[in-house]
Amino acid sequence: MSKAKHQVGGRGNILELPSSKLAKPISYEEGIFYSTIKNNDRYTPLRPFLPRTYGFFDASDDDLKRIRTKELKVMLEKLSNLALIEQKTNNTRYFVMENLTLGMRKPCLMDIKMGRRCHDLIDDYEKKIKKIKKCKASTSWSCGFRLIGLKKFNHKTGVYERRDPEWGVSLTEEQSEDPLRIFLNNGLKNRVDIAQFFFEKLKKLRAVLRQYTGLRFYTSSLLFIYDAFSNRANLKLIDFTHSHVDIPQGEDDDGYLFGVENLIKILEKFIKENK
Ligand SMILES: Nc1ncnc2c1ncn2[C@@H]1O[C@H](COP(=O)(O)OP(=O)(O)O)[C@@H](O)[C@H]1O
Ligand SMILES: [Mg+2]
C-alpha cells in the first residue's frame, strides 16, 4: 500500500491499492454524490465522465497496513444506499476508483478547478467571503476555471515539468490559455492529437451537462491526462467534496458550463493554429 503516484492536486492522500486501484479518503458528501450518480438511472449519461468506481470500505490506519488484494475484496462494499450505511467509528471511509494513469509510460496530468464559485452552501460567512475574494481575483471568475496543478513530460529535457496552485491562482485573464498551452507542448512539439481528443470530449461533456438543472460542482475539478509516449488520453470529472445533485436553478449556479465553454474555445484556437 503506497501513496498514489502522479497526484497534481489536492491533499495528496490518495492511496494506491495492491490491485492498482486508487482509494481516496472521502467526506460523507462525496460518498453520497458518487452513490447517487452510480445508482440513479437519471445520471447514466454522466457516468462515463467520472472515474469508474468499485465501492468503498471503512478502515483504520492499522487496517490499512494489513490490506492485501484478497482481503480488500472481502472488505469492499457496494456504493449503493451509502446514506443509509453508518460509518464504523474511528475509521476513515475510502472510496475505490480506477487509476486513470494505469498503463501509461509517462502520464501527464492537469487538474483544473472548474466554475466561478469556490464556496459551498455549508461554508460559514467568513469562509465564504474569503473564497469569493480568491475566486474574483483569479481566472475562476473571468474564465470559469483555474489551474490547480500540472505535470507534463518534456521530451527535450527528459524530465517532468510542473506548475503548482500558486502559479495557477496568479494568472490573469490574458494568461488563461497558458496552462493548456504548456500542458500540450512536450518540449519538441504541440500535441494537437491530444488537444483534439480533449476538444471532442469537452463538447460531449457540455451536451450532457446541459441536460441537468440540479447538478452543482462547487470546487470540483476536471482531470486532463495523456501519455507522453502514446496517443492515450483521458478526461474526467473528479473531486466531489462539495458537489450536489438537487440545487434549484438560480443564484447558486456554479459557472461550470461557462468554464467548459472557455476551455473549448482555447482548444479550438490551439488546434487551428497548429494545423
Ligand atoms: N481516478 C484517478 N486516477 C488518477 N489520478 C487521480 C484520480 N483521482 C484523483 N487523482 C489525482 O489526485 C489528485 C487529487 O484528487 P482529488 O479528488 O481532487 O482530491 P482532493 O479532494 O484531495 O482535492 C488529482 O489532482 C489527480 O492528480
Ligand atoms: Mg481536488
Image (cartoon, rainbow, N blue to C red):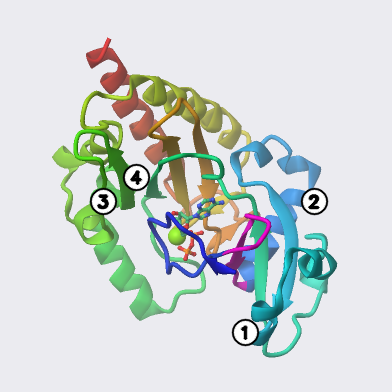
Disc sitting over residue 39 in the figure? 2
Q: Decide whether residue 22 is among the magenta residues.
A: yes
Mark 2 crowdedness (10 Å alpha carbons): few <14, some 14-19, many ≥20: few
| CA–CA distance in space, label 4 to label 1 | 38 Å
- What residue did someone put label 4 on? 144
Marks 3 and 1, how far apart in space? 31 Å
Please report whichever mark, 4 or 1, sits nearer to the chain's N-terminal start. 1
Name which residue type carries label 4. Answer: Gly
Q: Quadrant of ligand 2?
A: bottom left
Q: Quadrant of residue 85?
A: bottom right
Q: Residue furthest top?
A: 275
Q: Quadrant of the N terminus?
A: bottom right
Locate residue 35: give its quadrant.
Answer: bottom right
Q: Quadrant of the C terminus?
A: top left
Q: Is residue 201 left or right of residue 185?
A: right
22 horizontally vs 167: left or right: right
Distance from disc 4 to disc 3, alpha carbons, whole Å, reads: 22 Å
Residue occupying the point 59% across, 39% down? 49
